[in-house]
């Protein structure tokens, strides 16, 4: 017959054994949910969703794209980038480990999510009424964003990538395909984009808009190039990640896309709406990302919050004014 003391020790020993077994089981579950197996599963799921979304988009928009003279490759490029933009945004916003090819700081991941969403929304606008000009506009933005990033990643920052992870190969595959496709779609000799014989001459926007777009194109162009060339030297408002050259260049890529968008809007008024929409979504997205970081105690992104909040508000106001003026036109 066991006394109370012996019963107590026997119970604690049994409980400890059960606790160890439960802990081991929990660790196994955590490995399944957040470990290498989960990374591979999530990467596979994302790939399937991207292909399914692109196929569905091709069915939906194929006829419109063909009527506009947009052949299969540039059409699929816009559709896949649009679908991928919406698909990747939540993964990057929550900074899921399986969602990117190197360890991004949380703020950088959320800013990347904002850029992804902006490309998705701008792509929807282009696909809503596909024409040669807007499709070329979208491909140009994509090329300015991805081509410099791909070159810099391979030449300067290749050691940052873990080639034991499937997402690394996915990153280079996506960047390579989108970079080469967007460049190919920009050159008529490649016979990828058919230009109609009776193409309209570009109509520039109003002088005040042109002045504003010239300023924005120059500002974001200088900012983006400076971040690419001097990622270690810039800090403060210029860069939030001095020393992290790959993340700084990733952030610079979207600034080059903004510069390209505003530069094209200077010359042709049909590019005004997609440029402003892209800037609006990205500006408010970066503002939201900075506010989350500020709530978490990071005081660094205050300047970014002010700059991109102003960009989002100004772009939205200009879009609204443009919409009102079109509605009031006879």
Image (cartoon, helix red, strand yellow):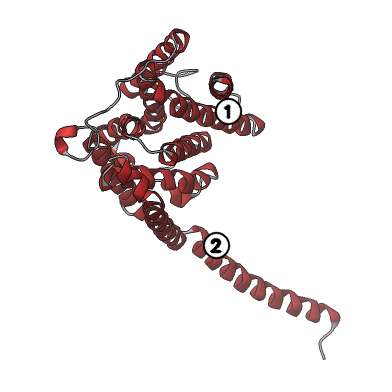
Quadrant holding the C terminus: top right
> In this rendering, would 231 be left or right of 318?
left
Local secondary structure at mark 2 = helix
Query: Looking at the image, is mark 2 or mark 1 nearer the viewer?
Result: 1
> Eyeballing the image, is 274 above or below 85?
above
Give the camera-side residue of 229 and 17: 229
Which residue is disc 1 drawn over? 287
- Residue 260 shows in the view: yes
> In this rendering, would 329 be left or right of 66?
right
Residue 274 percent across, percent down from the top left: 44, 29
Residue 105 percent across, percent down from the top left: 49, 37
Q: Quadrant of residue 164?
A: bottom left
Local secondary structure at mark 1 = helix
> Eyeballing the image, is 12 above or below 141?
below
Q: Quadrant of residue 139?
A: top left
Residue 213 percent across, percent down from the top left: 43, 15
Cα gap from disc 2 to disc 1, whole angstroms: 33 Å
The residue lying at 35 percent from left, 35 percent from top is 131
Which residue is disc 2 drawn over? 30
Give the camera-side residue of 330 and 87: 330
Decide: few, some or many residues near mark 1? Use Cα within 10 Å; few <14, some 14-19, many ≥20: many
Do the numbered discs 2 and 1 sit on residues whose CB atoms are within 8 Å?
no
Residue 24 percent across, percent down from the top left: 57, 69
> In this rendering, would 314 be left or right of 144?
right
Quadrant holding the N terminus: bottom right
The residue lying at 43 percent from left, 8 percent from top is 207
Decide: few, some or many residues near mark 2? Use Cα within 10 Å; few <14, some 14-19, many ≥20: few
N-terminal-most mark, 2 or 1 = 2
Question: Looking at this rendering, what residue extends furthest in the front direction?
Answer: 330
- Label disc, if present, on residue 211 of the rendered structure: none
Give the camera-side residue of 1 and 51: 51
- Residue 165 shows in the view: no
């Amino acid at each position: 017959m066991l006394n109370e003391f012996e019963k107590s020790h026997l119970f604690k020993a049994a409980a400890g054994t059960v606790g160890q077994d439960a802990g081991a089981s929990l660790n196994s579950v955590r490995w399944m949910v957040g470990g290498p197996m989960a990374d591979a599963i999530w990467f596979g799921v994302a790939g399937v969703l991207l292909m399914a979304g692109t196929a569905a988009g091709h069915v939906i928009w194929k006829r419109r794209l063909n009527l506009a003279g947009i052949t299969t490759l540039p059409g699929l490029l816009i559709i896949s980038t649009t679908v991928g933009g919406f698909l990747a945004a939540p993964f990057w916003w929550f900074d899921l480990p399986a969602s990117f090819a190197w360890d991004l700081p949380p703020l950088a991941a959320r800013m990347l999510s904002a850029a992804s969403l902006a490309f998705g929304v701008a792509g929807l606008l282009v696909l809503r009424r596909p024409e040669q000009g807007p499709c070329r506009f979208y491909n140009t933005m994509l090329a300015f964003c991805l081509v410099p990033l791909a070159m810099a990643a391979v030449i300067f920052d290749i050691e940052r990538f873990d080639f034991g992870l499937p997402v690394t190969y996915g990153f280079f595959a996506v960047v390579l395909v989108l970079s080469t496709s967007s460049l190919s779609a920009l050159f008529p000799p490649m016979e990828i984009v058919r230009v109609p014989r009776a193409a309209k001459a570009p109509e520039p926007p109003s002088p005040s808009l042109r002045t504003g777009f010239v300023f924005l194109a120059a500002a974001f162009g200088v900012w983006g190039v400076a971040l690419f060339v001097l990622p270690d030297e810039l800090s403060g408002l210029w860069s939030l990640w001095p020393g992290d050259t790959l993340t700084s260049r990733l952030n610079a890529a979207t600034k080059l896309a903004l510069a390209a968008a505003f530069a094209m809007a200077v010359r042709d008024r049909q590019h005004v709406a997609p440029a402003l929409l892209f800037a609006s979504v990205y500006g408010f997205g970066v503002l939201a990302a900075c506010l989350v970081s500020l709530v978490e105690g990071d005081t660094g992104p205050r300047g970014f919050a002010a700059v991109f909040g102003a960009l989002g508000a100004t772009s939205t106001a200009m879009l609204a004014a443009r919409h009102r003026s079109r509605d009031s036109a006879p």
